Image: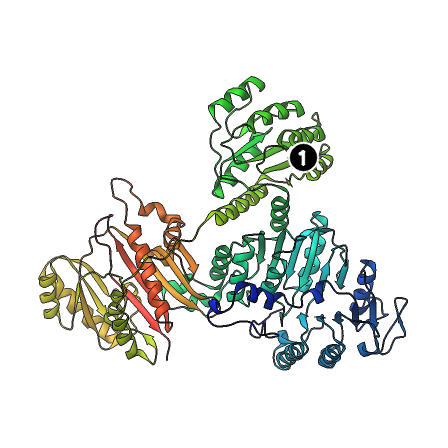
Amino acid sequence: MARQDQGASMGRSLPVGDPLLSSPQTMKHERTAGLDGLFRPRSVAVIGASCRHGSIGRQVVANLIGGGFTGPVYPVNPKAEVVLSMPAFRRVADIKGVVDLAVLVVPPEVVLRVAVECGKKGVRGLVVITAGFREIGGEGQQREQKLQAIAARYGMRIIGPNCMGILNTEPGYCLNASFSASSPLPGKVAMVSQSGALGEAILADAAQAGLGVSMFASVGNRADVTAADLLAYWEDDPLVEVILLYLETVGEPQEFVQVARKVARKKPIIAVKSGRSDAGAAAASSHTGSVAGADVAVETLLQQCGVLRVDNFRDMFSLAQALLQQPPPKGPNLAIVTNAGGPGILATDALVGHGLHVGPLSARTQMALRKVLPAEASTQNPVDLIASADAARYRDALRVVVKDRAVDGFVVLFVSPIMIDAAAVAQAIVDETRACKRPVLACVMGRQRSDEAHRILADAGIPVFRYPEDAAITLHMMWRRQQWLQRAPVKLPALSVRKATAARVLGRYLRGGWLQSGDAEVVLSAYGVHFAASQRVRTPAEAVAAAHALGFPVVLKAEAAGLLHKSEHRAVKTGLRTGDEVFNAAAELLRRLRASFGAVSLQVQAHAEGHREVLIGMTRHGQYGPLYAVGLGGIQVEVLRDVAVRIGPLDGKDPAEMFASLKGRLLLAAFRGAPPADVAAAASALLALQRLTMDFPQIAEAEVNPFILARPGKRSVAVDGRLRVEAQ
């Protein structure tokens, strides 16, 4: 069901403005205040409780009773005397005892009246399962706003509306205030789902995977309680060690970033985020806009917060189990032990493909392996014990390999042939890796006692996978988390800028639109983005004079309103070495382009000395704020789509990391006799661009493309820059 984002978090007032004016502890209290009334209630009223089999109202009551809720449950139904053998109340006001939590399963047109009754009763939290609110627009949107106002008036917190409910398996509460058909196992994982239907599937699959749940919330429309609130609530909860999120949108990105960055330092956060496509990005008019779509924004937002985004729930559950049960890898170097060459090769390819290393074992380790393995076995990495390997051979090999301190983690593969006892092999893996203090993941393939082998490994806390590629994904994400935890922010360098110069030029564009090329260069230059020397002229004769003044060779470019992508209109002439070439090129450009663009002028630009082209840019996303991008420059950016994007603000280390993450990063290094490109110059230019766009928030898009990189020590320069501002 499609959801909108406006209106989220309107149920209470959060600190706004300068974050320094509100302490993190104060802001956390604002988020978590009242949530105990939802997840740790003394009593629960189910308003809309029903006797009818198959109804949500009946299922919620049944789940509360069947789950063993430790307080009283009050069914509320004006037309029923008894619900599931319990006396029913006509109204919540008729209940004599305290009611902390009310679960609303009534028609949407009744919700507001019932919410007021709950507020007068002193209810602390509402779980509004009823649909028919913001998700339907129009009347539903207004109804949700009124519900938010009622909750704010009476100090109630809201989960939903349009949700499945909440759970808390904590022994002192045993709360299942949902209509889920699945009963989760108690455990150390907390979950948030934006989808009620998927929430049901998540709980069922988690139980099947043996993953225990501490708390669960289906947040629905997020009229009040959001994912950010729940992250803050679980930050210091000793019963929660890993947090799982299913997100359809990040409706409160600024809040989410602030909270997630802090919480992820203490507890792993794993997310499945749906909606990877972004058809609207194709309509963006700049290169940066066309490659920095909404999903790219979400991807980088989650990465920068330390949230581990996975593609599916299977990977989510596997990663959660591994993070709960195994120590983190201290580095990317992994060893593979296998009894079959094929799976060993698959594991190697998968690990290396995810940026991990399967390098040679130490000479000492290999020498020790030769003493305990048959001659046909391989002592290289992966260590191939060959098909006849039994439990004793696994013991001998693992006892040696775990002593190699250069290895940061282990993947143990076993394909069970009919003559080998898989359970005994599993026990050998458990015994020999128990004290290694590094992550161990196993892959058991085949059927000969494999179920028993799975149980032995799982009971010992060793994650078991069906295929080595799945183990590789989990180890990759574990290592990514360690890298994020180890990363320390770097302060921004001091910049010398001419803000008044930029403000004077931007002041001419109060109606918005793209700046003229010359004006864009002035603004960018005022903030330290250096351009190749150039002159602007109107006639072929003036172009020739400018070329002589600048020195040959030169580049000739046409400029006109609406002429954004010059290469598409063959509006650039390069390598002009004589006055005649400049004159003829200028005459041809003016004659051809005036028919399409009207008034056309020319820019004569000195040839840049550099030997690599990159792009730096910014596009301001309506929901996520400024997105900064780098990539290979010129027209390559749209063809190769090799772009790194991060959400601002960037720190002093971000630009270098962005360039290092490009697939084409080797093209910027020295190769085949060519010197390396001065990537540091491009990184400095990106930080200058960030300062410009922070000082002038009316700048909606900015792009320097190409930025010509010289060798280190020489002068790198931009040869084209564009800025678009919003109307003031």
Mark yes or no: residue 96 visible.
Answer: yes
User: What colouring does the structure picture have?
Assistant: rainbow
Which quadrant of the figure contains the C terminus?
Answer: bottom left
Label 1 CA crowd tier, 10 Å (few <14, some 14–19, many 20+): some
Relative depth, front residue between 446 and 65: 65
Front residue of this view, candidates 105 and 96:
96
Q: Position of residue 101 (x, y in %)?
A: 75, 69
Residue 288: x %, y % from top left: 38, 63
Q: Which residue occupies the foreground of this view, 84 or 340?
A: 84
Q: Residue at x 31, y 47 (%)?
A: 668
- Say which quarter of the image contains residue 707: bottom left
In the image, 395: left or right of 255? right
Q: State whether residue 553 is above or below residue 120.
A: above
Residue 250 drawn above or below residue 202: below
Q: Callout 1, which amino acid?
A: Gly
Name the residue nearer the viewer: 377 or 185.
Answer: 185
Q: Secondary structure at mark 1?
A: loop
Q: Position of residue 705 (x, y in %)?
A: 30, 60
Specify the quadrant of the image occupied by residue 626: bottom left
Of the 4 image quadrants, the one containing the N terminus is: bottom right
Count of marks, rendered view: 1
Q: Is residue 416 visible?
A: no
Please say if 384 is above or below 463: above
> At x 63% / y 64%, what residue is drawn?
194
Viewed as shown, does residue 332 lie left or right of 111?
left
Left or right, residue 662 beside residue 358: left
| Residue 602 x %, y % | 19, 69
- Residue annotated with mark 1: 446
